[in-house]
Image (cartoon, grey):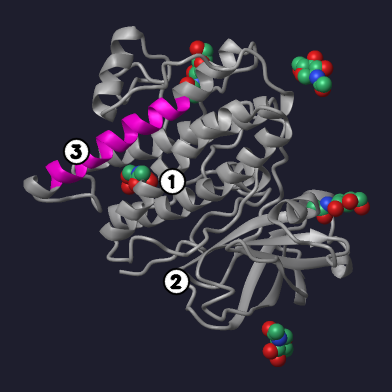
Amino acid sequence: MHVSFAASLIGLSCLSTLTSAVPFSFANDPTGEGYPTPNAQQLVQIETQAHGSIPNGPSPSSVSNDTVTSLQLIAFNEIFETAFFTSAIENITNNVEGYVFNEAEKDGILADLTTIRAQEELHTLFANTSLIALGATPVQTCEFMFPVTTLADAISLATVFTDIVLGTLPAIQQLLAVSGDAALIPGIGSVIGQEGEQNGGYRTFLDKIPSALPFLTAGTREFAFSALNQNFIVPGSCATDYIDLPVFEPLTVMTMAPIAAQAQTLAFEFPMCANGSAPDTSLYSLVYVNQQNLPVVEPLQNVTASESTDMMQFTAAFPYDGVTFGNGLTYALVVAGPTDGLTSASDVADITVYGPGLISIN
Ligand SMILES: *[C@@H]1O[C@H](CO)[C@@H](O)[C@H](O)[C@H]1NC(C)=O
Ligand SMILES: *[C@@H]1O[C@H](CO)[C@@H](O)[C@H](O)[C@H]1NC(C)=O
Ligand SMILES: *[C@@H]1O[C@H](CO)[C@@H](O)[C@H](O)[C@H]1NC(C)=O
Ligand SMILES: *[C@@H]1O[C@H](CO)[C@@H](O)[C@H](O)[C@H]1NC(C)=O
Ligand SMILES: *[C@@H]1O[C@H](CO)[C@@H](O)[C@H](O)[C@H]1NC(C)=O
């Protein structure tokens, strides 16, 4: 099975309201372990399920403010992942349509997902506890929504959000080094490998080759925070403004998933209501970030504004070549301003207006 979620991820426009399934919440202790505030005994229970523990050595007693932001993003992302796997476990346990398996299959899948969930819980608790120890604002839980209704689609989606994490954590390592907080780098590295193991498992489940690319797609904190807020957080269900990162306006890939592995023209859409009227798109370009390669810049073509939906549509070339561009995760971003000097995902994030659109091939 080769499924891409590029077009089915929900790009929430500023007009949309949540109409889908009941949002996921931790309010009634769905894990049965007191998460996200387990007591000491519940923590041991989580660690037993996770087959290991939170690092028990000393953690830094002071870090830069930028590092606080990184730890907040990590906790914010990991609590989303915990919510996602808890919802999947509930669905399988309760034989929800799309999640029905025979008893033997069910036991195996639940054993794997319960372990992975406990590992995600410990990632969150480690980041959150570090924030509390540093006197910084810990991360609050939100209500979540997931744009999937079968286990195969859920695991496909997990490969996309795990790819996002796998590109974001190295960006965070670089920022930690720049901020003089190098002591945190090895721990983050251990989580990168851990999430990579998870992704190999998801890809195997989906009959894909375990490893997607020789060098995974670079990300940024801004792309990750925007993607989480745009796709998975119920708007208004929690404060997010204490995390010092922007949430860009959404960019939706309108070309139906799965996106074929070939050079083609893709269709995109973004909301124009941010400024009340159609923005001047003459300053805009579409930029793709794929692998660790230079960003690929394409002009917006055939730009149209739809007053009835308050959306602007455009098309742009997707110059897939299967080697230097296009396999694995690709971020698509609409940027404003000159694109001559772009060499990294971080350069792209600095001038992003809409995004990220998410494209996943292979
Ligand atoms: C972080 O800790 C605070 C304070 O205990 C708690 O309210 C919050 O739910 C925790 N968040 C996570 C994501 O663990
Ligand atoms: C770091 O954050 C704290 C709390 O928000 C603030 O008081 C302080 O001025 C910040 N320090 C720097 C160097 O920006
Ligand atoms: C669980 O099932 C509900 C109802 O179909 C669905 O809305 C939700 O996305 C599912 N959760 C996951 C993680 O697949
Ligand atoms: C809104 O307008 C401002 C000022 O003209 C511009 O800098 C910004 O990029 C616009 N935002 C969007 C989302 O178009
Ligand atoms: C732009 O629109 C024209 C007219 O509808 C069409 O012929 C052309 O193929 C479109 N170009 C792209 C790049 O989509």
Q: Is residue 119 left or right of residue 248?
A: left
Of marks 3 and 1, which one's residue comes earlier in the chain?
A: 3
Amino acid type at circle 1 is Phe
Residue 139 on the magenta span: no
Q: Nearer the viewer, mark 3 or mark 1?
A: 3
Query: In the image, is residue 125 above or below residue 149?
Result: above
Residue at 64% over, 55% down = 356
Q: Nearer the viewer, mark 2 or mark 1?
A: 2
Name the quarter where the N terminus is drawn: bottom left
Of marks 2 and 1, which one's residue comes earlier in the chain?
A: 1
Amino acid type at circle 2 is Pro
| Quarter occupied by residue 334 | bottom right
Residue at 58% over, 45% down = 170
Q: Secondary structure at mark 2?
A: loop
Name the quarter where the C terminus is drawn: bottom left
Amino acid type at circle 3 is Ala
Residue at 68% over, 44% down = 222
Write the start and end of the magenta stretch as one range.
106-124
Q: Across the whole image, how many numbered discs are drawn on residues?
A: 3
Circle 2 residue = 258
Query: In the image, is residue 145 above or below residue 270?
Result: above
Circle 1 residue = 146
Residue 328: x, y in percent? 49, 65
Instruction: Note whether ligand 3 is within 8 Å of mark 1.
Output: yes
Whole-angstrom CA distance, mark 2 to mark 1, is: 18 Å
Q: Nearer the viewer, residue 147 or 38?
A: 38
Circle 3 residue = 111
| Quarter occupied by residue 49 | top left
Residue 150: x, y in percent? 30, 54
Label 1 Cα neighbours within 10 Å, binned few <14 / some 14-19 / many ≥20:
many
Q: Nearer the viewer, residue 327 or 264?
A: 327
Q: Secondary structure at mark 1?
A: loop
